[in-house]
Image (cartoon, rainbow, N blue to C red):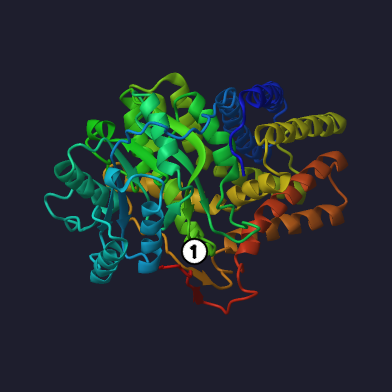
Amino acid sequence: MDYYIDKKDQKISTFIVRLAGLSYFSAVIWNFQWVVSHLNLNSIFSIIVSCLFLFATMLITVSGIVLVINNWNFSLLEPKKLISRKKPEVAVIIPTYSEPIELIINTVKSVANQNWPKSKRVIIISDDGYSDILREAVKKFKLQRGERRIFYHRPHKKGHPERRGEAKAGNLNSTLDWVVKKFPNIEFIETRDADDIVGTDDFLSYCMEVLKNDQELSFVQTIKQSEVDKHDPFSNQEAIFYQRVMPSRNASNATFPCGSGLIWRLSELRRIGGFPAWNLVEDLQSGFEILSLGGKGAFLPIVGAIGQIAPEDIPNFYKQRGTWALDTLRLFYFRNPIFAKGLAPMQKMHFFELEFSYLLSYAMFIFILIISLGLTFKVYPVLSSPLEYFIHFIIFAVILELYNIARSRGISYSQLWRTRQIWLGLMPVFMLASIMALAHGPYKKPAYKVTRKYHEFAWYWKETLPQKLIVGVLAISIVVSVLSGKGDAYMDSVLIFWALFFIYGLSQVIKNSWHGMSFKKAATKQEVEFDLV
């Protein structure tokens, strides 16, 4: 797939998104004003319901305004290969921790096979798992290929006084120190997850062209894809993120690192003291700190990394997305971008959007609660004439949908819906992460667990019980409303629509709870096959 859009198409797309954005901006303001002026204050019960509804509407309004502002511009760099014969030296760091050996060697092989001079790149497999088997596998691969610049490295163990950070950050910092000492001429560092093969043989050439042309650039982030089920039921390809969010961030110098398919200017990493270890993972915070010091990041629309495996069973999926949420919300609570020194206003807005998006799960939960109460007890959060209520709903819903379609250019409507379903289905996970982030405080981060590198297919009915309960409550509320024959037909029709919307939204994660069961027995492991030649 071609991710680059030429300048003419960029202008057309920008115009369409801005036009839809102005409509959506007006709609969210109009909707909030309408809600405030029509609150149902007739009883204690209705006041409580109305206040909850107002709070949830406020969260959505803030999110909508920020979304429109952040998507006002987008920018895509045109991928070009470095044509200079003088290639800079690059150190490729592959941090590992007990991943399957075959998977790691496949990654090393893909890095070694790139179109880049062997004399100009160093590959370091930094093993936090202290595996003798991996060390021998690296040695064997090195001898078979006649490679002199592939190294196996073991960082200091956790708790060692010279180790700077636990988990992946500590691993990376140890290797960074080793590179600086052994190869003082190296200017660039690539970080690549142990399970991510190179997406294009010219990855280094594309990234170096950008870095060499802009000496102020701190890092370049590319697209990461994964080898997943052809229908991508867990939305692991992150189409919206890479095709809309990152180009918008790129326009405001708010691109943040995503861990893999990423090249850093070494001097910029040293400026922040290496990879920060305050948070669970290092990538988001690294970019946050570099940008706060006036650094510059760029998003390059090429596939730089392909995950050999991605979470496609519910526990592993929850673990990965929950970690992302926990990591991001800790930054929001304790180092909020709005108050961060050094960030430009638009950079603050982009980081705020990313972090605040997880808290919208509370708004969704409140809306679901109010829908159920309204259908069951006929207590509505707003009071207006039935026709006005119905027309207001139709206008707002249509404008919302048109804006979502406009900003997701090049993405099928089914992909768009899948992304929304996954986000909604993760509501309980995000809510739990928000509580955990707050409970641990700024000085005690939760334990980090590496994402499992194999599938465990089973029917995870317990893990999706919260979603099933919500769907059940909404379905019962619809039945009660229809059978009772009471209430207002217009208002109930709107509530039934939203009830069905949430039922359909939650259905994908529920369906994913038995993903793979059609061809695998319960609780079995699916290992990935690798080519070791």
Q: Nearer the viewer, residue 395 or 46?
A: 395
Residue plotted at (42% across, 51% down) = 323
The quarter of the picture where the C terminus appears is bottom left
Rendered location of residue 444, percent (x, y): 28, 48
Identify which residue is drawn at 70% across, 30% down.
39
Task: Using residue 99 as the reference point, say whether residue 355 is left or right of it.
Answer: right
The residue labelled by disc 1 is 315
Q: Is residue 476 left or right of residue 518?
A: right
Horizontal and vertical percent position of residue 114: 41, 49
Residue 447, relative to residue 383: is it above or below? below
Nearer to the camera, 362 or 247: 247
Amino acid marked by disc 1 = Pro
Asked whether residue 93 appears in the rendered view, the answer is yes
- Residue 522 x, y percent position in the rendering: 56, 78
**In the figure, residue 41 lies in which quadrant?**
top right
Image quadrant in which you'd find residue 96 = bottom left
| Residue under the point 81% across and 39% down | 491
Q: Residue furthest bottom?
A: 521
Q: Is residue 373 above or below residue 295?
A: below
Q: How many numbered dots are placed on residues in this image? A: 1
Secondary structure under tag 1 reads helix
Spot the residue most to the left: 161
The residue closer to the viewer here, 54 or 309, is: 309
355 left or right, relative to 91: right
Q: Position of residue 266 (x, y in %)?
A: 26, 35
